[in-house]
Image (cartoon, rainbow, N blue to C red):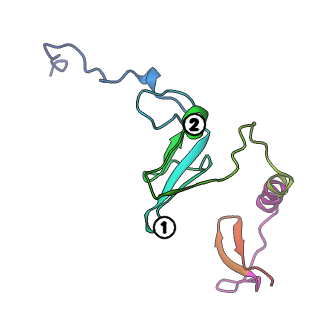
Amino acid sequence: MGEPAESRRGPLKSAVPSNVVSPVRRCSRTACGRPAVATLTYVYADSTAVLGPLATYAEPHCYDLCSEHSERLTAPRGWEVVRLAVDTGPVRPSGDDLEALANAVREAARPQERARPGARDIDPLEVARRGHLRVLRSPE
C-alpha cells in the first residue's frame, strides 16, 4: 500500500484561520470586535430587557455587549430596560473565593480515612458531594 492520494486542491485547510478564535468574549453586535463587558437578557413575559454584568458563561439566549453598545442600548416601545451595576474594572477574587479555594485544597490533601464497606459518615448539612467538594444545606 502506498501513501494516501492527495486531492487536486491540495491538503485540507480550515475555512476559518485558527488565529481568529479568541479566548476573550466579544460583543455580540455584528461587525463589532470589542471585548464584552455586559450581558443582555430579555424577560418577554414582563416586556423587560435586563442589562447586567458579564455572565459567567456564554449562553445562547443572552447577548454579550461591549461598553459602547451597552451604553447606547434601547428597547422596543413599551418595554422597560433594567440596568444592573456593571463593574468594568478587573475582576479580583474575593476573600470568600480565596477561603473556599484554600479549604478545597486542604480537603483534597487530607488523607482518606479507611471506612467499613457500606458505612459512611454523612454530615447532616451535606446535600450532595462531587469528589472533594460538598454542597451544604443552609443551617437556618
111 and 60: which is toward the camera = 60
50 and 131: which is toward the camera = 50
Q: Label 1 sits on what residue type?
A: Asp
Q: In the image, 3: left or right of 123? A: left
Q: Which residue is mark 2?
A: 36
Could you tell me which quadrant the N terminus lies in? top left
Q: In the image, 77: left or right of 109? A: left
126 and 41: which is toward the camera = 41
Q: Residue 54's x, y, as percent?
A: 61, 46
Q: Main secondary structure of the magenta part?
A: loop
Q: Nearer the viewer, mark 1 or mark 2?
A: 1
Q: Residue 105's x, y, as percent?
A: 79, 55
Any magenta on residue 122?
yes
Mark 1 element type? helix
Tell me what residue is drawn at x 25 percent, y 21 percent: 12
Q: In the image, 76: left or right of 10? A: right
Tell me what residue is drawn at x 79 percent, y 42 percent: 92
The stretch in magenta equals: 100-125
Q: In the image, 12: left or right of 110? A: left
Could you tell me which quadrant the C terminus lies in? bottom right
Nearer-N-terminus badge (1/2): 2
Q: Which residue is mark 1?
A: 46
Decide: few, some or many residues near mark 2? Use Cα within 10 Å; few <14, some 14-19, many ≥20.
Answer: many
Q: Residue 31's x, y, as percent?
A: 42, 27
The image quarter in which residue 123 lies: bottom right
Mark 2 element type? loop
